[in-house]
Image (cartoon, rainbow, N blue to C red):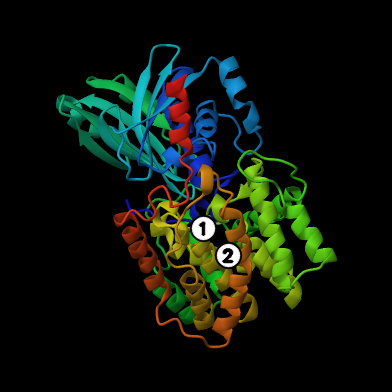
Amino acid sequence: MKSYPSIFNDCLSPVTPGPSSSNTAGPYRLGAMASDLLVGKPVHLHGEMSKKGGYFATFYGMHSDKAFLLGIMKKDLRSYNFNNIYADADAHGLSYTYEFSDNVPNRPSESAWLTLSSEVGDTIFVKTASLGGGEIYIDELDGIKTYIDGKYFYLLVRVAANFLPSIKNMLPGTYSVADSSSGESLITVRSSTPIDTDLVSKVRTANGVLYVRSVNPVYDIIPLDNPEMPFNTAKEMFSYAAEKRISLWQAALDYEQAISGLSSKELMDIAESLWDLSIHSAQEGYKVTSFEGNTKPHAAQAKSRYEKGPIITLGIADKASADALAIMEYAAAHGVIVCMPTGGSSGIPVPSIRYAAEALGKTKEDCLKALLVAGIIGIIYYPTHYHGAWGCQAEIGVAISMAAGALAFLLTDDLDVIERAAVLGAQSVLGQICDPIGGCSQVPCFIRNMTAVPTAVICANAALSGCETLTSLDEMSETILRVGLNLKKHGINDLGICYCRMQQDMETEVRKQ
């Protein structure tokens, strides 16, 4: 059964405490899924990651260690105080160990092997990956291949191979089967609706069944089975809008309706909630006085500077870039943000749209439509999963592309102008590497969010002025992937160029002790 990316699941998402979608929301989701698979209360977690992977430099700086525990304990991601997690884990009776080794592959960059044990003696072993933008999967359970992406309801049935045919006959819907060398098979059932409890009970007691485990969705929108999509590529999207004679925001709404089955009003309500939360994050960001990491808060100073001067003005970018910094600093303080499309680029789309719309005399409804345009442009880049492993071009670059297209939409309904604005946005930082110093998403992430705002404005204006791109939006998405592969091939983006080797230093200190 084919899957399609969702605007509100995969691009204007996740809603999470900062600082990172792949390092915070991703591990949280994986921890929650692992906890679902386990029978009994979790009492010990062992996590193993690659010494050559992305976690090695960012695991503690971006608080992945805390996020795994938070998910396993099933705390509310959006309201929980991250600073309490170690004390709460101890009080909960949950112990934990983390190690970095050469056993775990470094591709995907943020791979983790988790062993989770319960108070009743149950133990599971899962191989996991956080792909970027909160996207995750489990691809092995207790030594047998599977695929669990957290977007559906899953039933996992481990069965003796000679009983496999009879068990398969009991199962409805879509499922896959993987075999082990020990004569056992794992059936993975995927469903858009909760799996019938009576069926689960029957399967659990059937001959040959070794165990039955289940996983609940960790995403807000559960995609429909086999949806009829209006388009899949940028070329198809622009053709669809042109043929229907509709604006691009309406095409985005049609796309999301096809995936989710939700009404236009329900989807617009989601867009409004994300918009309001992003503005709230900026407002709260100006109040931040401290956060963990290697920098200090400066958003309030930036705001004061554009209000009182002296400053070299950039028009709407003065306010918008200060808001971008405020959102990023709020994320650094574990404030709840909307990743667009990642935590590391969450400060770009909404401030850009907000102050451009204000200058143009547009309404909030216009802003929400522009946000949908940004979201559907971001979907075209979904193959990157917006992950820093492809370079910061897949985070900041995609966010600039989204914002530039949205700003162009505020100026015109001309689909060609919107596409060129989006492409110019991505071209402006093509090849940019991901290199957070000290493993924290602060330097240079903060300044990149700020400079992205005027870049998006310039790209929208340039497109309206007729500037050529010589490439399509589809080709731009492919180009980012191709450049990202070369960054990996030549080791330019592996652990960045500016990393301070925080994990290596920590391990050295541990050995000394």
Quarter of the view holding residue 410: bottom right
Q: Is residue 286 left or right of residue 255?
A: right
**Residue where numbered disc 1 is placed:** 7
Q: Amino acid at mark 2?
A: Leu
Residue shown at the point (29%, 40%) measured from the top left:
175
Q: Amino acid at mark 1?
A: Ile
Q: Counting residues from the N terminus, which is met first, the one under dot 1 or under dot 2?
A: 1
x then y, percent, for residue 510:
46, 23
Label 1: which secondary element:
helix
Q: Residues within 10 Å of mark 2 (few under 14, many from 20)?
A: many
- Count of residue discs: 2
Quarter of the view holding residue 279: bottom right
**Residue where numbered disc 2 is placed:** 372
Would you place residue 495 above or below residue 177 in this image? below
Label 2: which secondary element:
helix
Q: Is residue 223 left or right of residue 300?
A: left
x then y, percent, for residue 110:
40, 42
x then y, percent, for residue 28:
51, 36
| Viewer-closest of 209 and 117 | 117
x then y, percent, for residue 75:
59, 29
| Viewer-closest of 300 and 238 | 300
Tag 1 near tag 2, CB within 8 Å: yes
Residue 364 is at least partly visible in this image: no
Residue 381 is at least partly visible in this image: yes
Furthest toward the top, the residue is 120
Mark 1 vs mark 2, CA separation in Å: 8 Å
Residue shown at the point (71%, 48%) measured from the top left:
297
Q: Residues within 10 Å of mark 1 (few under 14, many from 20)?
A: many
Residue shown at the point (54%, 14%) measured from the top left:
93
